[in-house]
Amino acid sequence: MEEEERRAFTENRRMPDRDRQSLFDALWKHWHPRLEVYLRSFYGLSLEDREELAGDALLKAFERAELYRPELSFDPWLIAITRRLALSRLRSQHRRRERTADLVELGSMVDEKQLGPEAARATGSPLGTVKWRMHSLRERLQRQKEADHG
């Protein structure tokens, strides 16, 4: 982008809708495929993730154009936005996987049929109380798992 184009980009909110749409279309046509290629470097993103994140980055850049300084190069600014979105997506995916793995592990460790007197002795509670607590815990974990996965 030339400096004149970058200045127009920063002031896109003042443009007539038709010109603004034209500017966004040109930005999309030029950058969307490039951002998808860049996003391939983030292990763990699916093709759908890459397509969605490339579009989200362009939309975010366009919506926040007034934060861009036109005297600076446009490329690193857009790449930084894309990178932050990709890392955020990967972190949220990782947390979801961790939570699911923890729930599965806890659920497998806590089998009512395998609870014995040693579990009750370890807590100082009667066996029936420990079984009731574990049953309640499993139900809460199941509800949380369902809430996390929609």
Image (cartoon, rainbow, N blue to C red):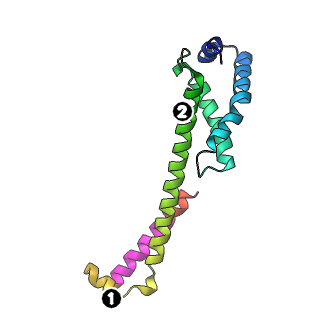
Furthest toward the top, the residue is 4
Q: Is disc 1 surrounded by few (<14), some (14 to 19) or many (20+) residues within 10 Å?
A: few
Position in image of residue 112 (x %, y %) = 44, 82
Instruction: Identify whether 105 is placed above or below 116.
Output: above
- Report the disc number at residue 77: none
Q: Which residue is mark 2?
A: 80
Instruction: Identify whether 125 is placed above or below 66.
Output: below
Q: Quadrant of the C terminus?
A: bottom right
Q: What amino acid is at disc 2?
A: Ala
Q: What amino acid is at disc 1?
A: Pro
- Quarter of the image where one finds residue 13: top right
Q: Are marks 1 and 2 in contact (CB under 8 Å)?
A: no
Q: Which residue is mark 1?
A: 117
In the shown orientation, is residue 109 left or right of residue 5? Answer: left
| Label 1 or label 2, whichever comes before in sequence order | 2
Position in image of residue 78 (x %, y %) = 58, 29
Position in image of residue 149 (x %, y %) = 57, 58
Magenta segment includes 139: yes
In the shown orientation, is residue 126 left or right of residue 1? Answer: left
Instruction: Identify whether 138 is placed above or below 89.
Output: below
Name the secondary structure under disc 2. helix
Q: What residue lies at 64% left-to-right and 13% top-to-bottom?
A: 8
Magenta-colored span: 128-142
Instruction: Between residue 90 and residue 112, name the one nearer to us.
Output: 90
Name the secondary structure under disc 1. helix
In the shown orientation, is residue 96 left or right of residue 19? Answer: left
Q: Nearer the viewer, mark 1 or mark 2?
A: 2
Instruction: Between residue 20 and residue 71, name the one nearer to us.
Output: 71
Instruction: Between residue 95 and residue 107, name the one nearer to us.
Output: 95
